Image (tube, helix red, strand yellow):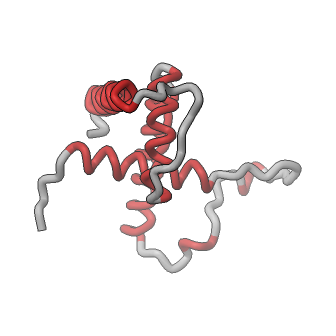
Amino acid sequence: MNMKRDTTDILNDLLQDWHRRDESYSPVEGNRTSAGFAGVQSLHRQWASEDDVLDIEVESGLLKAVGEHIMALSPEHRTVLQLEARNLATGHWVWRSARLPNDPKKLEQLRAEARKALLDRLIRSKLL
């Protein structure tokens, strides 16, 4: 197994995982939570080891930070990365936006700029 991964693969995995995490978030309106139970996690982890729970928490924090960095980018960069994340997560390259250029060369240039901007932010914040 190759332990050194290309930044393209790492960024693709982060975008895909971020999209899946973001899509799975659904606030429940109307249910009140007692302050004593505000931080309680669901029971789906009841059989997980302490290491598994720690891994889940670390990954969740990383993906939350990735999302915050994506949201801090320019609207065009944010949009192209959101669509790329959706395409990676679904495995189908069909998602498009009217906000992005129709010209494939311009779109690829914008995509490369957005990926570089995100990668630079993640490196500066020591997430990568």
From the viewer's perspective, tell me whether residue 42 is left or right of residue 64. Answer: right
Residue nearer the viewer, 86 or 40: 86
- Which residue is outermost to the bottom? 47
Q: Residue extending furthest front?
A: 103
Q: Examine the rendering and report whether any part of residue 66 can be seen.
A: yes
Between 60 and 9, the one lying in front of the other is 9
Q: Residue at x 31, y 44 (%)?
A: 11
Q: Is residue 102 positioned above or below 33 on the image?
A: above
- What residue is at 44 percent from the left and 26 percent from the top? 77
Quarter where residue 108 is shown: top left
Q: Quadrant of the C terminus?
A: top left
The image position of residue 47, as x and y in percent, is 51, 80
In what quadrant of the picture does the N terminus appear?
bottom left
What is the quadrant of residue 126 in the picture? top left
Q: Position of residue 101 (x, y in %)?
A: 47, 25
In the displayed structure, does residue 55 sit left or right of residue 18? left
Picture coordinates of residue 21, whole percent (x, y)? 53, 53
Image point 26% across, 31% down: which residue? 123
